[in-house]
Amino acid sequence: MSLATTYSPTDVEAKWYQRWQEQGFFKAKPNPKKKPYTVVIPPPNVTGVLHMGHMLNNTIQDVLVRRARMQGKEACWVPGTDHASIATEAKVVALLKEQGINKTDLTREEFLSHAFAWKDKYGGIILEQLKQLGASCDWDRTRFTMEPDLTDAVLRVFVDLYNKGLIYRGVRMVNWDPEGRTAISDEEVIAKDVQAKMYYLNYAVVGQEGQFLTVATSRPETIMADVAVAVNPNDPRYAHLAGAQVRIPLLGREIPVIFDEYVSVDFGTGALKVTPAHDLNDYELGVKHNLPVIDILADNGTLNEKAILYVGQDRFAARKQIAKDLQDAGLLVKIEEYASIVQTSERTKAVIEPKLSLQWFMKMEHMAKPALDAVENDTVRLHPPKFKNMYRAWMENVRDWCISRQLWWGQQIPAYYLPDGSFVVALTAEDALQQAIAQTGKADMQISDLRQDEDVLDTWFSSWLWPISVFDGFKDPDNADINYFYPTNDLVTGPDILFFWVARMIMAGIEYRQEVPFKNVYLTGIVRDAQGRKMSKQLGNSPDPLDLIAQYGADGVRTGMLFSAPAGNDLLYDVKLVEQGRNFSNKLWNAFRLVKGWEADASLPFVNEKAVTWFNARLQAAIVEMDDHFEKFRMSDALMTIYKLVWDDFCALYLEMVKPAYQHPIDAESLRHTTAYFETLLKLLHPFMPFITEELWHELAERGPRDYVTVAPWPRATAPANSAETLANMEKALAIVAGIRAVRNQKNLGPNKPLTLVAKTDEPQLVTNYDGIIRKLGNISEVTFADAGPTASVSFVLGVGEFFIPLEGHIDMAAERARLEKELEYAQGFRDSVQKKLGNEKFAQNAKPEVLEKERQKLADAEAKIAALEQALKGL
């Protein structure tokens, strides 16, 4: 045999991936004779490298795409990357710093040239890594969210939505990253558990000597931005402060005491400092009471001149200093430690500041309603559907979207400012000039008189167009690709971006194609370690996926990830799962080597009809079961169905049933059926384990130049005649084999020692029909029938009757009798002690009901064991 004795994934994977690409199997084009099946990849950040979440997500996508391709559909999986504004800019800024270059010393064009150079060098790493996983993407269709055509699409949408009145510029509270010096989206904010301090400060009541209002705050450095102190009107402690003023500690500025039921009476001191510039709830309270806004923080997180005190100090340094100064001034009542949560920037790790900022916003209410309806009425199905509640909660409480970022890497906002401070929005500078001339009446105005907005658009503002823009649906709305491949079929992503990306794509699809962008959304769980922690580089608890592939093979890793990955539920990663995947590959390899080693003899009779008929029934039932799992997006269950079919039914049972004696040939008909079954199993396994199945497919038979399992037809289930009866009868026969094996284990009779079997049964024909299988799997030399069991035998009872295995000559009867008698004596003594305990009136009256029940169960178990031992002795 040319096949290696052990499976070596590294020898197989690169070879077949290259051949699949050479054959063009992953390429897709509009084909009116085929149904389209389209998946767009959630574009990984251009800064990214493969991590465990990518492994799970892209394995699921590949399983779906490969199966669709085998079903004869025009399977199109579009790959690509996201420009990732904040992450990429941070990488480039850090790289330039290493070279002694500051971003501030560069022009925008110079910086972008560095950024594109970085992207060209590092930006495609993750896509190459996906190939090692086996991802069957149409690589000719690879897109990048900042490539010219996709950038043009983003700008067109911005201009269109602005012209529709859905985009505006205004001052609102945003998440501000002082390190990146930009607004960021909610999705880019990570909550972090910390031990924090609560500072209790005394605000002197004006005109009431010696009277103070105590306020608790975790951010004493913001008191200089206070504009009021709020209390609940129903709080009797503060009723006397109506119309009163208090002085801000250290600063001395007088601010009013206001009354609002928003303030909780029983939280803290019941008094709340109101700082509209630095807290969203305070801002809304300030708007309600018409309070001023004082912003004391600069963009880099230091205190500005409006703070008056600690100007130029970092916010956290100022916190330490003001606590000391408050202490010295006798205005600090106490400091308490407490568990808290701080919001941090996903990219820079800096603590986020709520900040009032002049930004560009998009109105969401207009688009949210149809996008909510699409999910509620299952035009877009969420898998699992439990995420509908989360989706509904978001969409019913949608806020306007801050779409501007204070960065250079990204699509620059197409707004142009005139010398008088007004602005126009246009796709190009030339268009902007024409608008400006029309707006001002100044015919001599030049492009140089206009200044384009410095900000770029949020990365999500490009990725929400992804299912349309990858097919050039904005550039050419009626092109063949968009008309054929849109809407896409299935989206695989995480629930953490259900609103930030999924909902927005639905909005864009309805707005610009009058059709939702996909039919199904499969929501994966988070990959966690054995302790339940999310895997991350920071925790050091995430293995390198490429190391896993190198050690266990891509097929082993793929199946390992899917073994416990039901939709929407987190995966508790354990390397044993991947080892199980690797072991499955080895099991398949060894099963193939066994079958390939058989030689057929055409003169031999077909003796394995029962086994062949049974496995065909099992196989067809498994195909039906798998198709049902796929239909319901139960990927893990679909894998387990084929896993059990291969491991338990095919390898452990069927091959043992039909296997010829050592160095003997097999009959030709049995080999023909076995080979056909193996071929079908390879097809069913291929979406999950593409590499080993392709290798074995080509070893199994001579293949034509394009005869690959990756494009082989997906098996269609048939209903064999009498399949239910076939399965039921084999189940009975296998129960007899299991009984024989149990006796062997109990009596230490090795599997190679031939035994005889005596059957006392009402179904002798069934035993006769399956005589060959019972003999072979149970290593039984003779099967006879009797009305009573022979002496010196051990028996087991099944639904079809009682079966006896004579032990004479196989064990030392005297020693066995002595062992059983000793065991019986111990069991009887144990029973007597339990009976005595239960018969103790004091114990019975005082013991808890569950303790009494436990003792009664012990008695029942002991009596059952005694009966079994007595029966065994009787048999001897």
Image (cartoon, grey):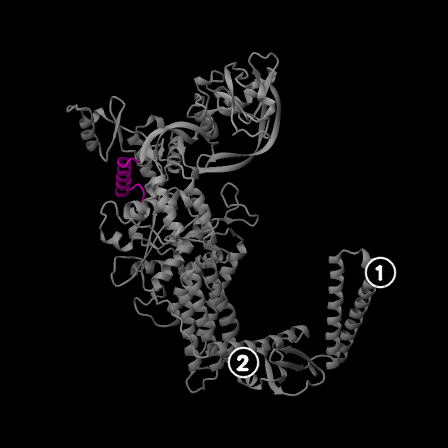
In this view of the protein, which residue sits in the foreground, 322 or 389? 389
**Where does label 2 land, which residue?**
773
Gap between marks 1 and 2, in whole Å?
57 Å
x and y, in percent, of residue 720 in the image? 43, 77
Magenta stretch holds residue 490: no
Residue 340 at what x, y percent from top left? Answer: 56, 34
Local SS, label 2: helix
Quadrant of res 634: bottom left
Query: Observer-nearest residue: 495 or 127?
Result: 495
- One can see residue 299 in this view: yes
Dominant secondary-structure state across the stretch colored magenta: helix
Instruction: Please name whichever residue, 499 or 51, is drawn nearer the observer in this view of the structure.
Output: 499
Which amino acid type corresponds to the residue marked 1 in the rendered image? Glu
Considering only vertical position in the picture, is 558 above or below 305? below
Range shown magenta? 144-165
**Vertical placement of 67 versus 342: above or below?**
below
Q: Which residue is mark 1?
A: 841
Assign the C terminus to one quadrant of the image: bottom right
Q: Label 2 sits on what residue type?
A: Ile
Q: Residue at x 52, y 48 (%)?
A: 528
What is the x, y in percent for residue 650? 49, 72
